Amino acid sequence: MNYFVGFMSLTDAISNTERSLSKYAAYPFIGTIPAALKILMGVIELVAAAIFVVLATPFACCSELARDSLEENLGHVKNGFKNIIVGSLEAVPFLGTLLYVCGCFFRITRAVAMGAIVGASEGLKQTDNLSVAPIAVTTGAALGAVFGGVAALSNE
């Protein structure tokens, strides 16, 4: 089990590095350096995970640990491909900026929408009187949207 605790911290480290590189790739021309690092990171992740997939595949039928490792590493193979493709796009001046801005906008919009849905649901749960339900749902949705947006902005 310690293997997966360590492995998950490696996964978290990879995710944090990817986000940081994308953030710096948003700067035109200068961003080609972090984008190139992201491509290199994608190649390393892809090759390392592919080796583990090849090694774990024969044992996947017999061992749950091997099956879990196989699934985890297949995810890293896909993520490595994604990093190569995204890094290649981010290396193009101004395209990296556009991708970063659109990505931030999408994450914030998604957080606001999810906050509104959860807030509306909670507002409806809190009322027993159907005559005030529209007010409770609207208030809950508005508060949820605000808190969802603030949470998304604080993570950027």
Image (cartoon, rainbow, N blue to C red):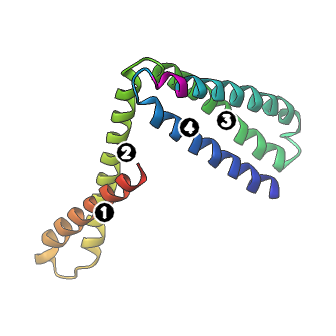
- Crowd rating for badge 4 (residues with CA inside 10 Å; few <14, some 14–19, many 20+): some
Nearer-the-camera pick, 47 or 156 = 156
Return the disc, 2 or 1, that comes first in the chain's sequence.
Answer: 2
Q: CA gap, disc 3 to disc 4?
A: 13 Å
Q: CA distance from mark 4 to mark 1?
A: 26 Å
In the rendered image, the vertical position of residue 63 relative to residue 36, given as above or below? below
Residue of label 3: 76
Which of the two labelled residues, at mark 3 and mark 4, occupies the earlier sequence position? 4
Query: What residue is pinned by disc 4?
Result: 18
Q: Nearer the viewer, mark 4 or mark 2?
A: 4
Which is more foreground, mark 4 or mark 1? 4
116 over 58 or under it: above or below: below
Whether residue 1 is visible to the viewer of this picture, yes or no, is: no
Mark 4: which amino acid?
Glu
> Residue 107: which disc?
2
**Residue 50 located left or right of residue 148:** right
User: Residue at position x 41%, y 25% from top?
Assistant: 96
Toward the bottom, the furthest residue is 128
Q: What residue is shown with label 1?
A: 147
Left or right: residue 51 versus residue 114 is right
Disc 3 to disc 4: CB gap under 8 Å = no
Mark 1 lies on a secondary structure that is helix
Q: Amino acid at mark 3?
A: His
Q: Secondary structure at mark 2?
A: helix
Front disc: 3 or 1: 1
Which region of the structure is painted magenta? 30-34
Element at badge 3?
helix
Label 3 Cα neighbours within 10 Å, binned few <14 / some 14-19 / many ≥20: many
| In magenta stretch: residue 32 | yes
